[in-house]
Amino acid sequence: MSSSSDMKPTAGADAAANPPNTVAANPPVTVATNPPNTVATWAAAFTSSVKTVFQGPEATVQAILVALLCRGHVLIEDVPGVGKTVLARAVSACIGGRFSQVQCTPDLLPADVLGVSIFNQASGAFEFREGPVMTNVLLVDEISRATPRTQSALLEAMAEGQVSVEGRSLALPDPFLLVATESPVESEGTFPLPEVQKDRFFLSIRLGYPDRASELAIMTAQRDARSPLESLRPVVPIEGLVAMQRQVLAVHVSPLLRRYILALVTRTREDPRLVLGVSPRGSLALYKGAQAMAALRGRGYAVAEDIRDLAVPVLRKRLILREEASARGLREEDILKELLEKVPVPPLGTGGEGES
Amino acid sequence: MPDRETLRRSRPEALRAVAHPVMAVGFPFLFLQGLDGLMRLGIVPGYAAGPFGTLAVVLLAGVSRTLVSNILGRERISGFLPVARELLVTLIACGVILLLLTGKPFRGVFDPGDPAIVWPLVLCATQWLLTWLVQSGLRDRELFLRLISGKTGHGLAAALHDAGGEAGQAHEAFQRLRITAITFEVFTIVPWIIFEAVRALGGYPGGSFFLTARIIVSCASGVLFLVVLHGYVNEHADIGAGVLPADAPAGLFGAPVFAVAALFFAAFLLAGGKALVPLSALAGLFAWLNRVLTLPLPPAEAQAQQPSDSLASGMSAAGGMDLPSVEPSPLLEEILRIAGIVLAVAAAAGLAWFVVRPLFRRGLLASARRFHPLRATARAIGGLLRALRALPGGIARWLRSPGRSIASIPRAILETIREAGAGAGSAARAREKAARLFRGRAVKEFLRLARWGERNGVALSRAEAPLEYAARLARRAPTRESAIREVAVMFERLVYSAEPEPGGERLLARMINGIVR
């Protein structure tokens, strides 16, 4: 087990008493704000900043942004060495928050993540040492290698925004983004997250290998002794991010589009190739995601494309395939893409009103 | 900054529903009633005054034009054929009513060619045409106001910028209407003045006080119309703050009316109290044409081919050629009779189908459910009564306003009417109605683009989002890529946003017209 953080946790500190948000040492860059376009302006600056160190597709950064604005968490399912850690660190640096990383192993205990009380001989009292979970961006590498007990502790943090340690509930910092990774290879000796637990993640993404030009750029950037992450500056202060999260809630989603979301998830529940379709948590995630995507694109209202662009990353891990479908090589995203090509988009496809 | 009151959302609706139809019907009707009075003096001998109630039928023709025009506009039906169909149905209906008003069918006399029917029908057609002319000219103003109403500040500035085309078109329409109105005035006042002078000098049968009153009413309505137009022009100038283009050159729209009025003037001068072209002369003209155009056949051919009957004998006699009589062929006559009947029935059936075809279009029931004539009529009458009730208040407001001028009278009256109308909750009803119908109109317009795309090999899929379809369509038509994308963005804004801009579907229609035409 290894953990690292940019700042040491304060000895004996109770996170509930301490200020939850600690701004990084680098001062935030002032972004010109125009109330209707604050989120879009910030998103553009954030994306360009992250792209200076992360050579993956822009859609990946956009997905992270959506999760950030919706107070959700991200599951990255991909092979090692494609930039998951760099991405998480870059996100943390750009929001001016603290970053922590947990490398999961089978012997990782919940206390290693949440924190533990240590007896201080000098003072003669127990002092609580915060675990790496007390941070703004937590990267949990290879979550499937952790035991179910440790996974549950992390999932509680994701769902409740707080952790229970030694009978006490400690509030997590705001904002709190958990980025978990899962490798599709080397599944021996692992504890894959149950499908019903994956439902707690807002969305799942795959980075994939970078293209040739990006990979060449990565190699070229290594000439500099300084890590490119050190050059990142916060794009917006933490308080600004919290304000934008509230702003996203005001984005209008037409009743047509709500019915469209419902039509999509209803089809997943009726599909014979699936054991389990999308839950109401999933439809709510898609609804909030559409709001965030619309705000990122500078609109005060969501459109059908916002929903369609997020449908696969948001709903992919909320489906359970039947064995025979899985044996045929069918994947969840194949079913979702098929549904996106079949379910009529209102109002053009439904004659003016959405499906009920 | 323009007066906030000018830009209330209820104003364009009030103009479209009440003010403009009243102007479009009233001004031509008052002109025609004056013209009718002049023609009854015998300027055109043979002019029949028509039965009692003729002027009501003429007014009805104008009112029906405004009502049908609003319906056609709401249903996005345009083109020559629907308008021609409407004119035909209107004239048929007016003819039937006039015939019944004469009372002759009840006495067993059926004579649709009676001059007492024909001349009023000419008046009905003229009323219909002039109403269409005026209402078309005021449509651009309605669209312009709808695009900028309800906006202030930066939104208003942006809307003014976007609506510059509509403002220019409205300005040109005002110019055309001004010229038309001035022409009407000149060719009502001048003939009357000349007639009165000639009557006094030449001892012709003169008019009466009633005729004088009709002429004065006609002239006053023209002056009022010009004042209102002048007020509109000033209002546009204020709203645009200089955005309006320079004065457009005079159009040719009033030329036919000008020509007709000039003909009346010339006819009066040349007639000198007698008819220039009496109806009997027209009958003689047709008879002469019949004689001249009937060419005599060589005797041998006439004997072998032509059937001999009284007509042929008469024609040959008129041509001065003696033709041998030929026995008529019963078979040929039967064939010609059957062919004539078939052609007549086919023509009648075609005409009937042309008239009733709109009743069979899809969505008619849905359109009929949306259209509640009694409710619309009651609302229009209520609006008219409120307008009349608000008229004294408008005059009082004008008298109190500082720096008042003649041109500001219509604005004062309109503001008073608008305030009275807003109190009845018309703005809330207009919003509900817009919300109910808005999406359907926008969808209809986008589907028009989709039909164009389908003709060019890019069909819209039901499970495709508008921007996705636009991207596919743009790849097929790269020269219109930006326009297609703008249409998709505009469409999504109209159907998905919380408060779509009023009049946006008209703008969408114009944008799509620019692509598909």
Image (cartoon, coloured by chain):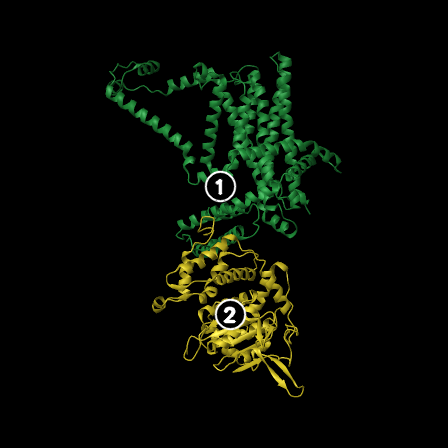
Q: Nearer the viewer, mark 2 or mark 1?
A: 2
* Res. B271 image quadrant: top right
The residue sitting at the bottom extreme is A121
Q: Colour of chain A?
A: yellow
Q: Is residue B45 left or right of residue B4?
A: left
Identified by mark 2, the residue type is Val
Image position, residue B180 (x, y; %): 59, 31
Q: Colour of chain B?
A: green
- How far apart marks 2 and 1 lie (CA) works out to 49 Å
Q: Chain ID for label 1?
A: B
Q: Chain ID for label 2?
A: A
Image position, residue B65 (x, y; %): 52, 32
Q: Badge 2: how crowded within 10 Å, few (<14), some, or many (20+)?
A: many
Image position, residue B422 (x, y; %): 64, 40
Q: Is residue B99 left or right of residue A99?
A: left
Residue placed under numbered mark 2 in the picture: A74
Numbered label attached to residue B421: none
